[in-house]
Amino acid sequence: MVRGQQGKASTIILSIVTIVGLGAAGAALYVEEQERSKRVALEEELTVVTQAKDAAEAQVDNLRQARAQAESELARIKSETDRIAQELAQAQQDKEAIQRELAQKSGEIDELKQAMQQEQSSRSTLAEQLASAQQDYQTTQAELQDLRRSKQTLEAKLKDLTGAHPVELEKVVVKKSEMNFAGTQPDTGTAVAVGALEGQVLVVNREFDFIVVNLGKTQGVSVGKTMQVVRGQDVLGTVRVEKVYDTLSAAAILPDAKKDQIKEGDKVRTL
């Protein structure tokens, strides 16, 4: 009787131990499965983060490349803009030089015409002067042809740079003045200091602030020489010679002059 009860108790205990063991094993398996699931989830999340990082780095590289290309293009555009600005400035200087040359050549042509008209009274002298005038006229025409070709080249260059119609250079008309064939002014009876020269303003260009006077190499005028512009007793200002021909000179109006008051016919005298 006692043994039978002990055997039942042992069976019950064994069953309990078995159940507990199975429970513990099941719990262990459950815990392990949970850990494995967490690990897999973390690995997947890490993979996603890694991919996102790689994509972000690739995007950053693309942005850097785009920025470098933009900076390179900006530098190229700036260089091209500077080049065009320099060419435009040079074209403007060429235009101004051509306008001054046209004014000077126009003065020489008018001077030759006046000289031929004034010297018609003397046949022998007229023949010599006419031959010289014709030679000078041909030289002037050749120089004018060169100026016209330079003008056409300048206009074509300006058209290429601006895409606009060619710029028409202003024609300067030289007014006739009373002077002999050598280019000196007639005697007016005005007292002049020893060594000083007196002449007359033939052309006033207010756009570029210069005048043309009837004094040149023949009268001893040289580049850099200064003159006063006068009208009666009034001194209108000072000019400096920049270009000299035989009987004409082009002089820049200096800042101290009353440039708005200077006009054709005013007197000039060397300092």
Image: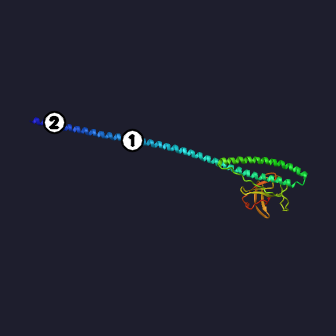
Q: Amino acid at mark 2?
A: Thr
Give the labeled residue for mark 2. 11
- Relative side of 262 to 123, left or right: left
Q: Answer with the quarter of the image where residue 196 lies.
A: bottom right
Q: Quarter of the image for the C terminus: give it.
A: bottom right
Q: Is residue 270 visible?
A: no
Q: What's the mark number on residue 243?
A: none
Q: Which residue is at the front of the view, 6 or 62?
A: 62
Q: Separation of disc 2 and disc 1 at Cα?
A: 51 Å
Q: Residue furthest front?
A: 165
Q: Amino acid at mark 1?
A: Leu
* Residue 45 coordinates in the image, percent (x, y): 38, 42
User: Residue at 88% across / 50% down in the picture?
Assistant: 127
Give the labeled residue for mark 1. 46
N-term mark: 2 or 1 = 2
The residue carrying pointer 2 sits among few (fewer than 14), some (14 to 19) or many (20 or more) residues within 10 Å by Cα, namely few
